[in-house]
């Protein structure tokens, strides 16, 4: 059985390009890379902390702190 050389790799890349198209290949590569990374991290037991998304009340735009949104009339209702 022979080894895979540069000509065979080029042929496989050309076949993948024909099957999936130029727009889908980067998406496929990205998903394969993230899947491999997640697998490696789960096998090695390494877990990175997930970023927390806490927003303090002082960071909210003015007018959005504990104030209810004004009621909008529905299209079928008549306004008096």
Image (spheres, helix red, strand yellow):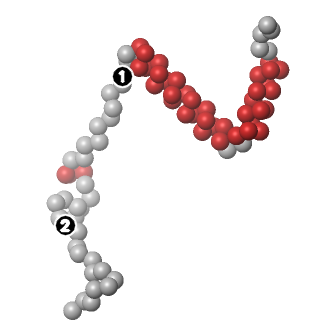
> Residue 48 appears at what percent x and percent y?
36, 25
CA separation, marks 2 and 1? 39 Å
Q: Picture coordinates of residue 33 (x, y %)?
A: 55, 28
Left or right of 13, for residue 45:
left
Label 1: how many residues lie within 10 Å, few (<14), some (14-19) or many (20+)? few
Where, quadrant-wise, is the C terminus in this rendering? Answer: bottom left
For the residue labelled by badge 2, is the local secondary structure a helix, a strand or a loop? loop
Front in this rendered view, residue 57 or 32: 32
Q: Residue at x 19, y 66 (%)?
A: 68
Residue 52 locus on image (x, y percent): 29, 37
Judge by depth and name the residue closer to the eye, 33 or 1.
1
Q: Specify whether 63 is left or right of 17.
A: left
Q: Name the residue under label 1.
A: 47
Q: Which part of the image, by quadrant, shows the N terminus?
A: top right
Q: Residue 25 carries which label?
A: none
Q: Name the residue under label 2.
A: 68
Give how far across and how far down residue 9 sits, in percent. 76, 22
Q: Is residue 7 above or below residue 65?
A: above
């Amino acid at each position: 059985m022979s080894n895979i050389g540069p000509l065979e790799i080029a042929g496989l890349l050309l076949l993948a390009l024909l099957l999936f198209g130029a727009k889908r290949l980067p998406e496929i590569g990205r998903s394969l890379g993230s899947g491999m990374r997640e697998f490696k991290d789960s096998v090695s037991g390494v877990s990175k902390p997930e970023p927390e998304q806490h927003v303090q009340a002082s960071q909210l735009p003015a007018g959005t702190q504990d104030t209810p949104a004004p009621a909008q009339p529905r299209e079928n209702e008549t306004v008096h």
